Structure formats: structure tokens, C-alpha cells
Image (spheres, rainbow, N blue to C red):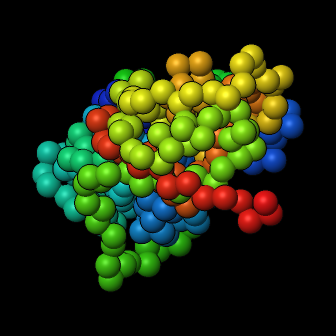
Amino acid sequence: MTERTVSVVRAGALTTVQDLGRTGHAHLGVPRSGALDQPAHRLANRLVGNPGEAATLETTLTGCAVRVGRAVTAAVTGAPCAVTVDGRPAAWGAAVRVPAGAVLEAGPAIHGVRSYLAFSGGLAVPPVLDSRSTDVLSGLGPAPLADGAVLPLGAPHAPPPGADAVPHPGPVRELVLPVVLGPRDDWFTAGALRTLAAGGFRVSSAGNRIGLRTEGPSLERAQDGELPSEGMVLGAVQVPPDGRPVVFLADHPTTGGYPVVGVVPGPFLAAAAQAVPGTPVRFVLRRPRFR
């Protein structure tokens, strides 16, 4: 009997295995990791009958192609793209039956950055610290996909439930990110905070799963020197010496010495994960309630 596997035909620019991440290990220096666009990851799993924590494939810009060993139900969500099964058009954002030996391909993103491929049963690579996620910073989890790699699939959980409607994200014309100020906003001048709120920033092509980097004006500091390393959280807006904000994403370091001017709340980070280079960025500043 043919095994329940997917074999990588085309790995794409960067395709990784992701689930909901390895939470609870930051005190050991282990990042959270996990799918950058968690709503898209969860939706792909729901469409094929998996629980939200099942592992999927996260592609970057150029998509990927895999051959299935046995017939499976698959779904592609996240950044819209052309989906084919053995070269024939298939639906994006819907459950698709892929016959044994067929090639499922998610093409380059039409807009957005990251697409998610879910398979009934989920990707059953060995978990590391209770997660199957690839962490590009620490190297934990399976290696990023390479052509010829073979990944096991788990047993199907339930029949796909179907969906009456699936969100179809449009192009992000402007990335609007709320920023709760602190803990180190006092390291920056009042003018720097006005600059942060005034716009003029764009998504840099230098970003990755660790952080969304920006291009644009430099934030002026009110204090010189550097901080001792302190804990970093998901969504932290760290400002390195060049003065241009970096928004930390799922593979961010757990400590750092550059000041954090504020934190972007978690629900807004999926949009950051899908913003293409050159997208205008507007930070909306908020004061924390306890001040």
C-alpha cells in the first residue's frame, strides 16, 4: 500500500512546516515560531477536517508543489494563488481531493506573501518541544523544504465539514499597525514619536519570519548607549541603531538590547505577515491603560 506522504517536487523560495508554535519556552531562549498568518493556517486545517493545531506548509511568495503518496483532501489559503492538481485548475480556499500520485501545486502569490497548504491528517513530522514548527532563527523543527524531501502525513481526523463562504483577502494598500507604547518609549524624543505616527515607512524586502523590517525615517533617541538584554515579546517594535523600526514576528529572539518603543497586538500581525515589500506602513500609537 502506498504510504501517506507528500514528496516535494518544487520547494519554492522558502517553504516550512508550521503549526501554532512552541509556546511556554521563552524562558529557555526558545522562540514561539508557528504560522505567521494564524487565521489562514487555521482556516486551511478546518477546510480539510483537521484541528487548528495540525501542521501545514507555509510558502513564501513563490509557492510550492508536492506529490501525494495516497489520495488526500487538501486546501490552500492565505495569499491567493493559482492552485492546480496535475496541471488542472483547482479551487483556492476550498477542500480539493488530490488523487494518489498527483501533484498539488500552489503557484506564486497573486498578492500577499504567504500561502498555507493543509492536508487531511496534517503533516506528521516529529515534534520538537511539543511543536512541529520550523524555527528559522534557532534551527529547531524540520529543515525548510528542499526538492525531493518526503514528509509523512497523519491519519485523517474527520470528514471535511465544508464552508459556505471563505474570506478572500484583497491586496494590502497600507499596513496599519496599532502600537501600544512602551516599555522603552522614553528612550526616544517626542519628535521621534511624532515621526513614528506620521507615516512615511514602507515594508522592507529585508524582512523575514523573524521580523518585518521597515524603510523610511529614522527615530531619534533621547538616550545614548544600549540596554542590557531584556525579554522580547511577539509584536515588539524594536529600534536598532539605524533608527528604523522592526516588528518582531513568530521566530523573533527572546531577548535583545535595542530599545522597544511599543508592541503591536497579536491579532494585527497576520496582516504584517502578508504585506509585500514596498507597502506603506502606518503606526497608530496608543498609551497603555495602566499609565
Question: Which residue is painted at 66% across and 58% down in the image?
Answer: 287
Whether residue 19 appears in this view of the structure is no
- Residues 159 and 256: in front is 256
Question: Which residue is painted at 80% across and 63% down in the image?
Answer: 290
Q: Say above or below: 78 vs 146.
A: below
Q: Outermost residue toward the left?
A: 88
- Residues 17 and 169: in front is 169
The x and y percentages for residue 51 are 58, 66
The x and y percentages for residue 220 are 57, 28
Q: Which image quadrant is residue 188 in?
A: top right
Whether residue 235 appears in this view of the structure is yes
Q: Which image quadrant is residue 27 in?
A: top right
Query: In the rendered view, does 142 fall on the left or right side of 224?
Result: left
The x and y percentages for residue 273 are 44, 45
The x and y percentages for residue 172 are 30, 53
Query: In the rendered view, does 92 fall on the left or right side of 78?
Result: left
Question: Which residue is painted at 74% across and 16% down in the image?
Answer: 225
Q: How many numbered tags mark residues here?
A: 0
Which image quarter holds the C terminus?
A: bottom right
- Residues 189 and 210: in front is 189
Query: In the rendered view, does 104 fall on the left or right side of 258?
Result: left
Query: In the rendered view, does 266 fall on the left or right side of 172?
Result: right
Question: Which residue is painted at 42% across and 46% down in the image?
Answer: 198
